[in-house]
Image (cartoon, grey):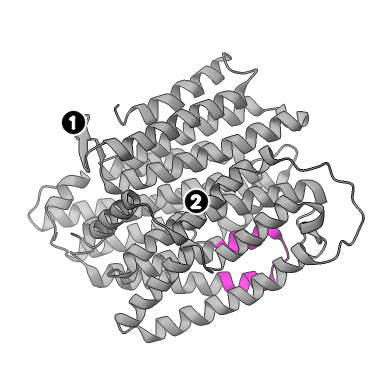
Amino acid sequence: MSPSDLILVPLLASLAVLLGAGRERAAVVLVGASFITTTLAIVEVSGVPPQTAVFAGLVRVDATSRLFLVVVNPIFFGISTYIWHRVRTTPALREGISRLVWLALVFLASTNALLVANHLLALWVLLELTALTVTPLIVRPRSEASRRAAFRYLLFSTVGLGLVALGFACLGRGMEGAGLTPTFMVDRLLELRPLPINAWGKLGLALVLLGLGTKLGLAPMYSWLPETYDEAPPAVAALLGAVQFNAALVVLFRVVQIYRVSSPGLVTGQLLAMGLVSMVVSTVSIIATRNIKRLIAYASINHAGVIAIGLGVGGSATYGLLLYVLSNAFIKAILFLTAGKIMAHYKTNDTRVISGLIKELPYSGVFLMVGTIALLGFPPFGSFLGELLILSALVGSGRMLTFAAFCTLITMTFVATGRTVFPMIWGPSKEKHDWPRQTLPSALPKLTFLVVLVVLGIYIPPALNVLLQQVAQSLEGR
């Protein structure tokens, strides 16, 4: 099997839908294609040597690629199953489904291509392509607010990636100034470590980190994220938060793998600053919001801040950071899909109106409760162990002020989130509703994500543990 199969399968399926061959059963095509890519990703992880390069070195499969292939594709498959079930049970959603499917499949192909790309400029192009394909999916029929959100998302995405492109140009100029032949091949740059960093190199690295921080929803350019996640349909919000976020994170990982050894102070300082400010912004916003999807969106900013801090500290925090990233992906998928189910029934996103979920929508109530507990970093979930390792590394590195700020902000987030979410689950019903009975098949994707979350918290399979260690070592420049 070739890594290109992970790209060709969704592209061919997308072409079939676009040309009309799969138009009548577009959602089935989506589920089938994503099931095949999920199977291929698992085979890729279990059967390929640690590093392989094909297509003249432009495609390279290493530990980072393998880890995220086996995270992104199963999550996309779960979201696809959710879409198929919603379309099957709600005929009104069948309008425009073929458009959603072919764009989503191009999005998946672009994401998989990004995960195995071995060239920084190719990573940049593919990340922009994921933004271009997901932007139309943010728009809901007859919703001017969603159009504004889609435009705002595309604007910030373009600005962020523009900063990344300018940063790459400065990095290339810095290599020339240091007497090196400029190259953007990732494996070649890894061989050249430590790269000489002059003023051009420092400027370029700072711009790249800022631009990728914009894509991740980090401060200072985070304001697109709450509006976009709120206005997007639940499945699209899950794609943005659980799939595209990880694609952007892989690009950041590549940059850190290359430049941490060369300029550790700049990498650490900028990531810590963006991470802490993002946590402050998200905490204040969580306290103030009464919108369920915006609450999850602000929590996503908080998660991005924690990831930036863990990546900036490095060392013993790196393994915990990766556990946190994996858990975060499944948590956001669960919460956004659950929020969609809740809003479809209550016809509102106001947390003050929603109450009595555990009685009226028992599956959704359980998923919201467990997802919130995992979101807040409690055991037995992988997010708990990840946060613990990051905090331990902060203490071990002597960053006590950062440690104190981290603990304070996490505590405030816990109180504010619990104050909002738990009354929705356990509070008395404010009105009598006659909901259709919830079925297990509709809950199966989220139930699978939940099982993965628990496994990450109590037992990490040996093969996954080895893969996490390999990625952690690469992020430390080893």
Tag 1, which secondary structure?
A: loop
Specify whether residue 347 is in view: no
10 Å crowding of disc 1: few (<14), some (14-19), many (20+): few
First-in-chain label (2 vs 1): 1
Q: Nearer the viewer, residue 109 or 441?
A: 441
Amino acid tagged 1 = Ala
How would you classify the magenta stretch by its main secondary structure?
helix
Q: Is residue 292 magenta?
A: yes
Measured as percent of width and height from the top left, residue 222 is found at 52, 61
Q: Is residue 193 magenta?
A: no
Residue under pointer 2: 452
Amino acid tagged 2 = Val
10 Å crowding of disc 2: few (<14), some (14-19), many (20+): some
Specify whether residue 360 is in view: yes
Q: Left or right: 343 with respect to 304?
A: right
Query: Whole-Å distance between the Cαs marked 2 and 1?
Result: 36 Å
At a point 72% along the width and 37% down the height, the residue shown is: 141
Q: Nearer the viewer, residue 356 or 178?
A: 356
Q: Which mark is residue 56?
A: 1
